[in-house]
Amino acid sequence: MGPHCHHGPVGSSRLALFTAKYAATTAGVLVILKIWAWLTTNAISMQASLLDSAIDCLSSICAIFGLHFSQRPAQPPYVFGLQKVEPLVALGQAALVVGSALFLGTESLHRLISPEPLENAPVGLAVSLIAIVLTTFLVCVQRYAIRRTHSVIIQADSLHYRVDLFTNLGIIASLSCSHWFNIFFIDSIFGLGAALYISVGAVRLIRHSAGELLDKGLSEEESTHFQQLIEEQPGITRVLWLRTRKASTTIFIFSGVEVSVQTVPEALQILKKAKEALKAHAQNIEVFLLLED
């Protein structure tokens, strides 16, 4: 997939915000259901899933605020806009994920050493099945939004809900083993597995968010693609240097170029047309071209 595929269409910001609001609503419903199921079953896997959904809800609320601020237009003193609010919020989400993984792992080890019988398994199974249906639909909506917007906040949010799918499957397995086969340690094993899965996802999210905060440039392939586009513009003879960075869904291109004309007005006209051509090629892109001697 080339660099021109990395930008959502007009309205992508609204799509990302809608997705975050829908996620927060779904998580709120799941929290209510899982509180009832946890108190009824006394299952560590259900407690893990409840904790996960509570963090999901808080994370989605943070995502709403993050997206709201990141979509504000650029104005002094933030002349490049507030897009970096997104990776900042994503780092906060990752911290929540790590905290939940540590808590879940500790609880699972404790229950593995001192197993406790589970109760009212059918209630937990029913709630888990409902959660799987609601979460699967939500993850599909998020995947669509990520393809259209490439929002790091939605990617972070989606990680939480994919974990929720994993923990709900663990609940079904552990409650089934406990109810029909009197095997209680499966409950703790799935809790530990969920904690490990959460931790791996959090590390990936931290690396991605830190890259945006530190102004990580585009890949070599993408940078070469944009350099070729600039050099193909009429009147531009050579690209002397090129720097890139990405903030949320916006790509910033900075480049020094040589032109084939001598007068300043003609050179400025060439640069103007080149900028327009690049913006027409890819949405959500800001281009800064400088004349070099």
Image (tube, helix red, strand yellow):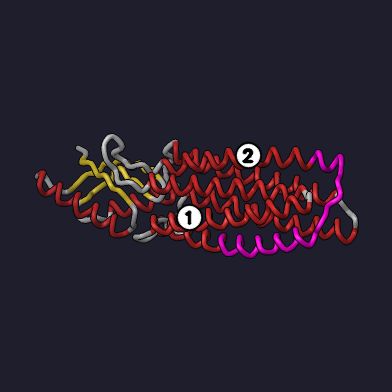
Q: Is residue 234 above or below residue 201?
A: below
Task: Indicate the amino acid at tag 2.
Answer: Val
Q: Could you say where residue 182 lies in the image, as x and y percent from the top left? A: 90, 55
Tell me if label 2 and label 1 are in contact, CB under 8 Å. Answer: no
Please identify the quadrant where the C terminus is shown.
top left
**Which region of the structure is painted magenta?**
109-138
Q: Is residue 256 magenta?
A: no
Task: Name which of mark 2 and mark 1 comes first in the sequence.
Answer: 1
Image-based side of 15 in relation to 232, left or right:
right
- Any mark on residue 21, and which? 1
Instruction: Please give the name of the residue rendered at 63% of the width and 52% of the height, measured from the top-left corner.
Output: 31
- Within 10 Å of the Cα at label 2, are there few (<14), some (14-19), or many (20+) other Cα atoms? many
> To which quarter of the image does residue 282 belong?
bottom left
Question: Does the magenta stretch mainly form a helix, a strand or a loop?
Answer: helix
Task: Indicate the amino acid at tag 1.
Answer: Lys
> To which quarter of the image does residue 277 belong?
bottom left
Image-based side of 275 in relation to 215, left or right:
left
- Any mark on residue 98, and which? 2
